[in-house]
Every structure is written in C-alpha cells, then in structure tokens.
Image (tube, grey):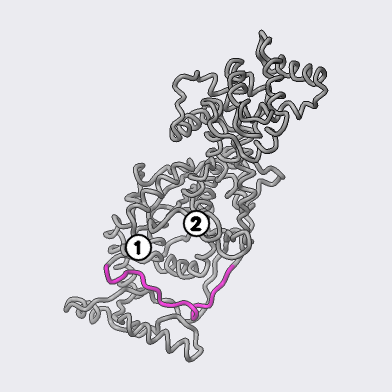
C-alpha cells in the first residue's frame, strides 16, 4: 500500500530543548487538523536523543502548552498506543536492531575520525572551494570485521550512512512539487553517535516507518535533509511517507521570528492574555486558507475546511496587530461562564474579593466588558470598579472632566437620579435627557464627570448600563464622595 493510500497517521515530534515556538505550534496544528479532517490518528513523539540539550522543564512546558492549545494527541506520552514507547530515549534497542541491518547490507559503516580531524577536513574543503560536506569518507571502506575488532579493543566510533556518490535523489513534496538533489552534494551522515544514541535523521526515519506514519508535515528547514531520508528508506526497502514541508514564519519586518522580534513562544502569548482558540486560528491562517474569505473561525470550522493542498509554500509574516484584533474577536465569541471564571481568578489575584457577588452579577459584568477586551488579562482591571469603590482616578480624565463647574454638574446629576424608583438603563437615560433640557447643558457635559466619579476611568461600557449594574445606592454614594475632588 502506498503512503498516500495508507490510513492517515501523522505526528508532532518536538525535541524538548526549549520553549514551544509558534512555528512548532503551527506544525502541530496542521498535523492535528489533518488527522481530524481525515479521521486519522495524531500522535506525539518526543525526540529526546540529544542528551546534552535535553531539558526536563522544557518537556513539562511543551506538554502543558500543547494541552493548553487543545491539541490532545491520540497516542503518545500519558496516552500509550500500539507503537510505543513514544520517547526516543526509550527506543534505543529498536535503533540498535535496525542499524545492524544497514551494517550487514553494507549501507552503513563505522567511522573512527576524531572531531579534530573532521574540523581539519571541513577547513580544507572550504579553503579549496570544493563542496563542503564536512567529511571526506575516510573510513568508508574499512571492512566491518576490522571495524568491530577495533571497537572491541576500546576505540570509539560513530556509524555513518553510505550515501551513493553519484546519481540523483528526488522526492515529491505535496505543496512544492518535485525536488531533486545530486547525491555527490550529500554527506555520509551520522546515524548513531558515539554515545550510542541515534541522530535525528536515523531515529526519525526508523520511527516514522515503525509508527506507520503516512504523512510527514514539518518545517521547510528539513527539505535539504529529506533526500538523505529517502535514501535511508530505500536502503531499508521501506515505502517513504508523503512529505509536506511547511512555509517559514517571518517576523513582521522580515527575518526570522524570535524572542527579540516579538513574543515567539506559546507560553508568552498565553501569559499575555490570548485565548488558545485565537492562537490556533491565527497560526493556521499563516500559510493556509479555507478557500473563502473567512478569518475568525472555530477550531471545528477550520478542521472541516482543512486540506494540505491549500497550504501555500511561500514564507509568511507574523502580524501581531492582526493577532491582537483576532483575540478581541474570539473573546467576543467566547463563553461567558469561561470568562467569568477567568475574571474571578484575576480579581482575586489583585486582592479584590468577589464572594459577596452573585454569579448572575458577575456574568452581567462579563457581558458588558467582553466586547471591549482585547486580551483576557484586560478583564480584571476593566472590571475592578464593578466590585470595589475606585480609590484612584485617571489623572488625564480629571483635568478634562473635573474642571470648573464640574461639582455643580455632578450634584445636579445626583439629584436627578435620586427620585428614580426604577433604576434601569431606560429610566437613567431618560433622567439624563430631562436634565439636558432643564439645564441647557449637552449630554456630553453631564456624562464625563459622573462616569469618572463612579468608575475612576473615562471609558468603558455604556454609562446607563454601568449605573444599572452598580445599583442606585452605589452610584449616588460614589458621585457624592467624589464631589469634593471636583472644581466648584
């Protein structure tokens, strides 16, 4: 059965050496979407064979961030399937078994060259203007019996792949078409290191085959490695998967996206107050489109529209302003109960108690604020005056709204509201309009001073709705308490 006709099994295979970059997250998203769209399997494999760079904390953060995004794997860590283990460091016996096949067939060989010698070879290649492979195949023809005898006597060696010295190796990329490399430009790559751990190239090929991977969706930095992988598949006599190399994500001003050029990790965006749905939606559209002009989409809507053929191979820029706008859109669409729970936690974190307020009141506050929030982290500060009397007042707003005559205005508003038996948005609005007619003042003149008195800020939801939520006694007492701060 060819790779394209196999049941869809795709993987996200990160190395736990640092934070989950948004480029890696997008790779995970595309694999997840493709698996779900094709009713296939999405599995997580941890490529932890680089023991010098392995970081336990990075592994913990990686699993946390994937779960936060909602990209739950069907098989992998804490979710074992039929092809485990899913940590490469636990599969060393498998790699040891498979490398013997290549050694016996003559497709791999032991290399005893020291790091110093390899540096000298590379320097000489660079100086001569020859193709720089970093290796000159010095140990390629050492008989395997001799090599094993040297190892038995304590010599250290790596195991290299015997790449054909002539010919062309090609492969079909699902979104880039046919790609070819001349074999003479490829180096005899290391398959097994001196510490007996496999390199990425060897472990990846072995695992993708044994874990029955049908499609490999990965970053375009792996394009130049793919011919080596194709040759490994051929040496084993295995059918390679379908390859799809994803476009690079650039910083807004060009160049590689990095911490210096804006937040580049999933954890950063979570801490800034982005919803996971926002980040998935935004990253999915960096290189893919649903075939129409939709931008703000649910995860299910994107899965329903997803196909690999709609991925564009061209590099795409990361527009953080667009991301911020999209986050606001997703917050507007977000479940009120989820936002209410977030709001309560956020208020408690800044020592504002909510236990005396009803769930209906908190939900009503959320309904007022959600259309104005760009980040989840906006909500607690925006909502604080609904739960506690403001202790400070915006300085810029004070100079604008509490100047000469503002105290008299506030007093007149307070007196206009006092007689109201029903204190709702409609009656409050009517009282303000009646006051404009009797005083000759504009509505804007009346609103600014009392909004600041009641909320401490100059902007927010509709004033009638704020007053209704806070209740008559709260509103009147806050205006009265602020009057001495205003100019007569």
Say if 77 sits above or below 224 in the image: above
What's drawn in magenta, residue-wise?
179-195
User: Height in image: 153 above or below 462?
Assistant: below
> Hey, which residue is sitting farthest top in the picture?
421
Residue visible at 54% across and 63% down in the picture = 220
**First in sequence: mark 1 or mark 2?**
1
User: Where residue 280 sits: x, y (%)?
Assistant: 55, 45
Q: Position of residue 181 (x, y in %)?
A: 54, 74
Mark 1 vs mark 2, CA separation in Å? 24 Å
Pick out the residue farthest to the front.
Answer: 488
Q: Residue furthest left?
A: 153
Residue 171: quarter of image: bottom right
As for residue 202 lying within the magenta part, the answer is no
- Residue at 54 percent across and 70 percent down: it is 170
Picture mark count: 2
Q: Residue at x 52, y 42 (%)?
A: 273
| Horizontal side, residue 227 vs residue 444: left or right | left
SS assignment at label 1: loop
Q: Is residue 413 left or right of residue 88?
A: right
Q: Position of residue 260 (x, y in %)?
A: 52, 61
* Marker disc for residue 216: 2
Q: Give the position of the C terminus as an image quadrant.
A: top right
The residue positioned 66% from the left and 8% from the top of the image is: 421
Q: Is residue 108 left or right of 219 when viewed as pictured?
A: left
């Amino acid at each position: 059965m060819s790779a394209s006709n196999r049941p869809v099994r795709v993987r996200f295979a990160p190395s736990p050496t640092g934070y989950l970059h948004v480029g890696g997250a997008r790779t995970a998203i595309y694999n997840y979407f493709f698996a779900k769209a094709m009713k296939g399997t999405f599995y997580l494999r941890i490529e932890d064979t680089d023991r010098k760079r392995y970081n336990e904390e990075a592994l913990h953060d990686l699993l946390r961030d994937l779960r936060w995004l909602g990209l739950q794997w069907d098989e992998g860590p804490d979710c074992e399937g039929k092809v485990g283990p899913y940590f490469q460091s636990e599969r060393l016996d498998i790699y040891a078994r498979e490398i013997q096949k290549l050694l016996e067939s003559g497709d791999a060989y032991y290399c005893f060259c020291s790091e110093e010698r390899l540096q000298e070879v590379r320097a000489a290649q660079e100086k001569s203007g020859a193709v720089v492979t970093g290796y000159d195949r010095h140990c390629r023809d050492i008989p395997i019996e001799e090599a094993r005898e040297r190892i038995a006597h304590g010599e250290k060696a790596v195991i290299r792949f015997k790449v054909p010295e002539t010919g062309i190796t090609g492969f079909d990329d699902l979104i880039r078409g046919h790609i070819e490399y001349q074999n003479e430009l490829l180096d005899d790559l290391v398959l097994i290191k001196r510490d007996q751990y496999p390199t990425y190239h060897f472990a990846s090929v072995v695992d993708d085959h044994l874990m029955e991977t049908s499609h490999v969706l990965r970053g375009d930095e792996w394009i130049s490695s793919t011919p080596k992988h194709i040759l490994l598949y051929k040496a084993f006599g295995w059918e390679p998967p379908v390859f799809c190399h994803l476009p690079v994500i650039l910083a807004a001003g060009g160049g590689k996206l990095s911490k210096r050029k804006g937040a580049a990790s999933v954890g950063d965006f979570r801490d800034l107050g982005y919803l996971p749905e926002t980040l998935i939606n935004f990253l999915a559209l960096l290189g893919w489109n649903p075939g129409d002009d939709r931008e703000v989409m649910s995860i299910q809507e994107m899965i329903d529209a997803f196909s690999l053929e709609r991925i564009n191979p061209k590099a795409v820029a990361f527009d953080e302003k667009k991301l911020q706008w999209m986050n606001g859109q997703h917050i507007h669409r977000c479940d009120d109960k989820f936002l209410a729970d977030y709001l309560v936690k956020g208020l408690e974190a800044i020592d504002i108690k909510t236990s005396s307020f009803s769930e209906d009141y908190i939900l009503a506050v959320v309904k007022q604020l959600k259309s104005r929030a760009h980040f989840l982290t906006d909500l607690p500060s925006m909502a604080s005056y609904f739960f506690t009397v403001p202790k400070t007042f915006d300085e810029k707003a004070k100079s604008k709204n509490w100047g000469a005559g503002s105290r008299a205005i506030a007093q007149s508003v307070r007196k206009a509201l006092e007689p109201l038996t029903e204190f709702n948005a409609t009656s409050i609005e009517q009282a303000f309009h009646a006051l404009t007619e009797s005083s000759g003042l504009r509505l804007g003149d009346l609103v600014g001073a009392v909004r600041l008195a009641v909320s401490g800020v100059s902007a927010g939801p509709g004033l009638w709705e704020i007053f209704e939520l806070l209740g008559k006694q709260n509103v009147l007492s806050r205006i009265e308490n602020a009057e001495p701060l205003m100019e007569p």
